[in-house]
Image (cartoon, helix red, strand yellow):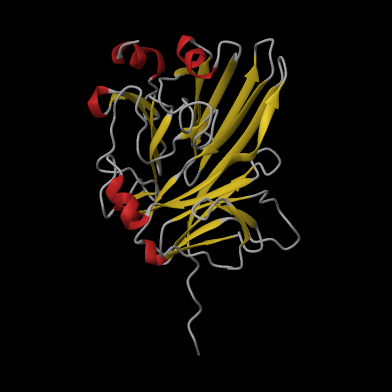
Amino acid sequence: MTIESLQKKWNRENWISIESGKNNLPKVVLTTPNSLCEVYLHGAHITSFKTNNKKVEHLFVSEKSIFQDLKAIRGGIPLIWPQFGPGSIQTHGFARNIDWEISRVFVNDKSQSVEIEFTLHSSEYSQKIWGVTNEFKTTYTVTLHADHLDLGFDVRNVGQIPIEFQLAFHTYYSISDIENVHVLGLKNRDYIDKLDNMKIVKEQRRELTVRSEVDSVYLNVVPEQNYQPLQLVDLGRKQTVTLTYDYQNIPDVVVWNPWIEKSKKMDDFQDDEYKQMICIEVGVINKPIKLTTNQLFQTKHSIIPSPMPAKEPSL
């Protein structure tokens, strides 16, 4: 569909606007009185999430990111599906590389929220990559509230053969500086260190900081008694971002930062941008999901920024 036809069908005054984005790729701009979210149809890729009267950007997108058909956008929230990392098909799957269709929109004036639903079906392109027997329907729901973002992801097997997949919300968070941030909620969790021969290590730190390249997959991060929520703390911004997620269906957490040397080798990433971002990804990675005919997988994830509480003055 053309931009004009998309606008005619889906625009909602003050809430939803279809616009021409970078390289003329169509994007959806969701707005509430306090927040904004941009989603490209290419990959159903969220590239912006702002709160605080639309002044504070929570997502990082590289200045060198390539906005082009069949290429993944570097930053924002790429959808990693149906494969995480390298494997039998292309790295991180194909969902982030192709156009999705808008299937539904909803505006809730009472709660000051706006919702949009995208769908992706098995196609000649997906079958060429993943196999002709893998038939599916995926639904991705993005709901923008005044102060947080809700994401929902569903997969239904519409074929006759079982399908198997991994999934990750590969979120790039915008930060003041990598030296100002730490991650909470991963202490005592086992993780796969992808930089050390896939060795399984137990996290000893309460506050996880990044001072070198990191690529770690934390396994089965489910709530325990008196557990610490998964949070990104930015002392420079005086902000905490709380990540809530469906522990039963997407129990794994990835922390990634390319640091200095890897940044220099990435064509779509500036040499010093590692200082401005950190990836904290929730998903199902270690034990792929298997769906039989007509079986449905559903999951959800929320990103909730909030200011850090002011310290009590000392007496």
Residue at point 65% right, 44% down?
A: 251
Q: Is residue 236 visible?
A: no
Q: How many marks?
A: 0
Q: Residue at x 51, y 13 (%)?
A: 127
Q: Position of residue 110 (x, y in %)?
A: 54, 35
Q: Position of residue 307 (x, y in %)?
A: 46, 60
Q: Residue at the location (42% across, 26% down)?
A: 43
Closer-to-camera residue (89/283):
89
Quarter residue 267 falls in: top left
Report the front residue among 265 and 108.
265
Residue 89 vertical position relative to residue 122 in the rendered view, above or below: below
Question: From this viewpoint, which residue is outermost toward the front?
Answer: 197
Q: Is residue 186 above or below residue 252?
A: below
Q: Residue at x 27, y 50 (%)?
A: 264
Horizontal side of residue 203 vs 162, given as left or right: left
Q: Quadrant of residue 202?
A: bottom right
User: In front: 23, or 5?
Assistant: 23
Camera sees residue 210: yes
From the viewer's perspective, tell me whether residue 47 is left or right of residue 272: right
Q: Position of residue 312 (x, y in %)?
A: 51, 78
Q: Residue furthest bottom?
A: 315
* The quarter of the displayed image where residue 49 is located: top left
Horizontal side of 158 relative to 262 (left or right) equals right
Quadrant (top left/top right/bottom left/bottom right) for the N terminus = top left
Percent position (x, y) of residue 30?
40, 32
**In this rendering, is residue 209 above or below 12?**
below
